[in-house]
Image: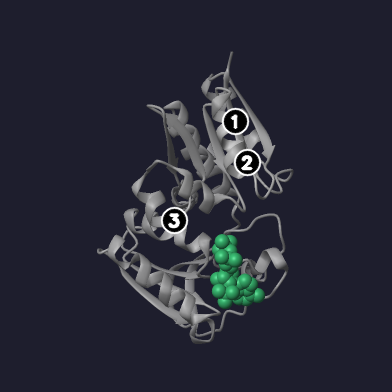
Amino acid sequence: MSKQFAVIGNPIEQSRSPELHHAFAEKTGIALQYSKRLAPLDGFQHSVQSFFDQGGSGMNVTVPFKEQAYSMSSVLTERARIAGAVNTLWMENGQLHGDNTDGQGLVYAIQALGWNLDQTDILIIGAGGATRGVIYPLVQAGAKKIVIANRTLSRAEQLIADLKDAVPGAELIACGLDQLNGQFDIVINATSASLSGDALVLPDTLQFQHAYEMAYGKPSSFLNQAKARGVAHSEGFGMLVGQAIESFSIWNGIKPELKDFL
Ligand code: ATR
């Protein structure tokens, strides 16, 4: 029988993970089945347990269960521990292992665009879970300064207090959205503004060479402003593919090439 994988979330219908993993499997010649699992909001742990009890090999975890997956994992990777969230689960030596591949997915996506990360100054807008998951991988990939700008300044400050010891090589700075200015190599929109259709206003005093929107398939005022300025820009589909590639590689020991799936 082929190896069994699944993505678990609530809702789950929208997930593109099965099509991505089946495409990777076809490209790499690995036999697997990858399905969607809807877990009840109060039934995540039970669903995970029964999936692995039935011989499942690995699971991706999506909204709203990434923090529960983190709590449930017996063994965590360094980046999952720092992110405080898990999107990739597997059993090893009878223990549930948890990793977080979202940040590395973003790094792969940025590298596939040909944007340099080494010694860069990066601005991340937003200070929620999406931002928490990407700081450490961005610093590992070479970012030297990261400014975290958030509507609620105290949340950006708290995030930096939580993460600064994990990234001693980089400078982390918090600011409010109303204080946006300066020069950056890359600006990343990690807010949920595009998902809710809200506008983000980037002032002229803010200058940047590249703009990455973590959301995809939605109108984005952030991307529209980048386009109007004529700077290189991308929406977040590459990050989605990138995190899936990293999970696939952990489970199957072979890493598909991101550019083949964009
Ligand atoms: P996620 O886990 O996807 O990061 P989250 O934890 O709900 O989701 O965080 C959403 C982020 O988007 C927050 O940084 C939020 O700002 P606040 O902390 O001030 O709430 C930001 N956000 C959401 N809607 C926004 C908007 N219309 N303008 C600016 N920031 C917005």
Give the amino acid at mark 1.
Ser
The reply to whether the residue tagged 1 has its Cβ within 8 angstroms of ligand 1 is: no
Q: Which mark is residue 84?
A: 3
Residues at marks 3 and 2, CA–CA distance in whole angstroms = 18 Å
For residue 238, which numbered disc appears in the image? none
* Quadrant assignment for the C terminus: top right
For ligand 1, which image quadrant applies?
Answer: bottom right
Circle 1 is placed at which residue position? 50
Which label sits on residue 8?
A: 2
The residue shown at (43%, 43%) is: 99
Q: Residue furthest left?
A: 169
Task: Give the residue displayed 44% in from the left and 51% down from the top.
Answer: 107
Quarter of the view holding residue 97: top left
The picture quadrant where one finds residue 199 is bottom right
Nearest to the observer: residue 17 or residue 161:
161
Do we see residue 86 in this rendering? no
Q: Residue 253 in the image: state x and y as whole percent.
A: 42, 27
Horizontal and vertical percent position of residue 54: 58, 23
How packed mark 2 is, by other alpha carbons closer than 10 Å (few <14, some 14-19, many 20 or more), is many
| Residues under numbered marks 3 and 2 in contact, where contact means CB atoms less than 8 Å apart | no
Question: In the figure, is residue 48 to the left or right of 79?
Answer: right
Which callout, 3 or 1, points to the residue nearer the camera?
Answer: 1
Residue plotted at (38% across, 52% down): 81
Instruction: Choose mark 1 or mark 2, whichever is in front.
Output: 1
Disc 3 packing (10 Å; few <14; some 14–19; many ≥20): many
Cα distance between the residues tagged 3 and 1: 24 Å
State the quadrant of the N terminus. Answer: top right
**What amino acid is found at the position of numbered circle 3 in the picture?**
Gly
* Left or right of 132, for residue 241: right
Mark closer to the chain start, 3 or 2: 2
Indicate whether 157 appears above or below 255: below
Q: Does residue 141 sit above or below 3 in this rendering? A: below
